[in-house]
Image (spheres, rainbow, N blue to C red):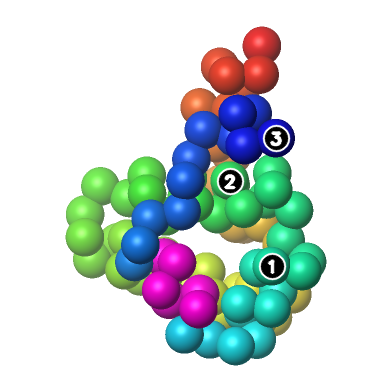
Amino acid sequence: MQDKFPHRIPNDFKEAIRSEKNVDKIWNEVITPLAKNEWICWVISAKKDETRSKRITVGLDKMKKGMRRPCCWAGCPHRSKITR
């Protein structure tokens, strides 16, 4: 399964998720592997450190509010190349 999804969760995002009990539960029980890959790609695709930090904060908040994928983002461009 992991082979279809090219991204592994970076430590800063992993620690942020673990630090929020509600988000940790959502991440492990609700978010699908495909959606996890989308969140990870959204976070790591930020070009600036400030943007990356903001995306982590915003992502955690959105997950708490029930969002399962990043909003207003075209999706992981790397996935389509791997799964073809």
**Of helix, strand and loop, which one carries label 2?**
helix
Q: Main secondary structure of the magenta part?
A: helix
Q: Residue at x 69, y 48 (%)?
A: 33
* Viewer-nearest of discs 3 and 2: 3
Please tell me which residue lies in front, 3 or 16. 3
The magenta segment is 13-18
Q: Which mark is residue 28?
A: 1
- Left or right of 26 on screen, residue 45: left
- Is residue 72 shown to the viewer in this render? no
Of the 4 image quadrants, the one containing the C terminus is top right
Q: Residue at x 21, y 60 (%)?
A: 49
Q: Residue at x 37, y 49 (%)?
A: 44
Picture quarter containing residue 22? bottom right
* Mark 2 and mark 1: Cα distance apart in space: 13 Å
The kind of residue on which mark 2 rests is Asn
- Is residue 34 shown to the viewer in this render? yes
The kind of residue on which mark 1 rests is Asn
**Image location (x, y in percent) of residue 55:** 41, 65
N-terminal of the two: label 1 or label 3?
3
The kind of residue on which mark 3 rests is Met
* Mark 1 and mark 3: Cα distance apart in space: 15 Å
**Image location (x, y in percent) of residue 57:** 43, 76
